[in-house]
Amino acid sequence: MQLNSQYKELLDKALERSGQRATKQREHIFSLLLEKRDHPTAEEVYARAKADMSTISLATVYNCLETLVDTKLIRQVNFEREPTRYCPNLTQHAHFYCRESGEIVDIELPDQVILELMKVLPEGFTAQHIDISYDGKCADCD
């Protein structure tokens, strides 16, 4: 699996800023997350990665995911008592977690909603990121 040039450049620049370099494994893991944006766990990423890169280890997958999180190319998504999942969507958005199916869906948040949320912060507080998650049942499981 090959990263397109736009994402390859993004990866290279982010890694360079953090004093690291691109590797085939990092590129492969990043491309898997971009290809299918379904918020996989590390074990799911590992299973997908093995299909095209049979020698990759679970430890390498974890290390690649950690590097991608550290360089802010992906973010971790956590729900109570569930394994960590990974999301390449870096726009301001919320997540909906369906307790029945386990599916996680991105919910785009309009700028006006973000502005209203920032207004309720105590005086002198600033937020770099807002993390909103919904927990319930999706339409297919209702």
Image: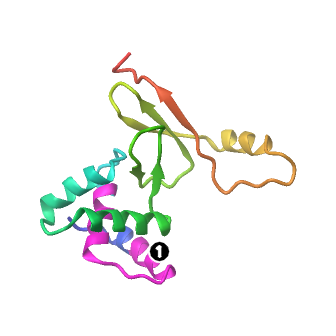
- Residue identifier under label 1: 14
At a point 47% along the width and 39% down the height, the residue shown is: 79
Q: How is the image coloured?
A: rainbow
Position of 11 relative to 77 (above/below): below
Left or right: 73 as drawn, with respect to 116: left
Q: Is residue 45 left or right of residue 96?
A: left
Where 17 falls versus 1 (above or below)?
Answer: below
Q: Considering the image in quadrants, where does the C terminus appear? A: top left
Who is closer to the viewer here, 40 or 84? Answer: 84
Q: Which residues are magenta?
A: 9-33
Expressed as whole percent of the image width and height from the top left, the position of residue 116 reads 74, 39
At 33% from the left edge and 72% from the top edge, which residue is drawn?
5
Residue 52 horizontal/vertical position (percent): 14, 63
Answer with left or right where residue 49 lies relative to residue 11. Answer: left
* Three-letter code for the amino acid on which mark 1 is drawn: Ala
Residue farthest to the right? Answer: 123
Quick check: is 25 in the magenta stretch? yes
Location of residue 61 by image quarter: bottom left
Q: Residue at x 25, y 75 (%)?
A: 24
Secondary structure, mark 1, is helix
In the image, residue 10 above or below residue 32: below
Question: Could you say where residue 99 lies in the image, as x and y percent from the top left?
Answer: 40, 27
Q: Residue furthest top?
A: 142
**Could you tell whether 96 is left or right of 116 in the image?**
left
Q: Is residue 23 in the magenta section?
A: yes
Q: In front: 102, or 3? A: 102
Q: x and y percent of residue 15 in the render?
A: 44, 77
Q: Is residue 3 visible?
A: no
Q: Main secondary structure of the magenta part?
A: helix
Q: Which residue is more in the foreground, 12 or 103?
A: 103
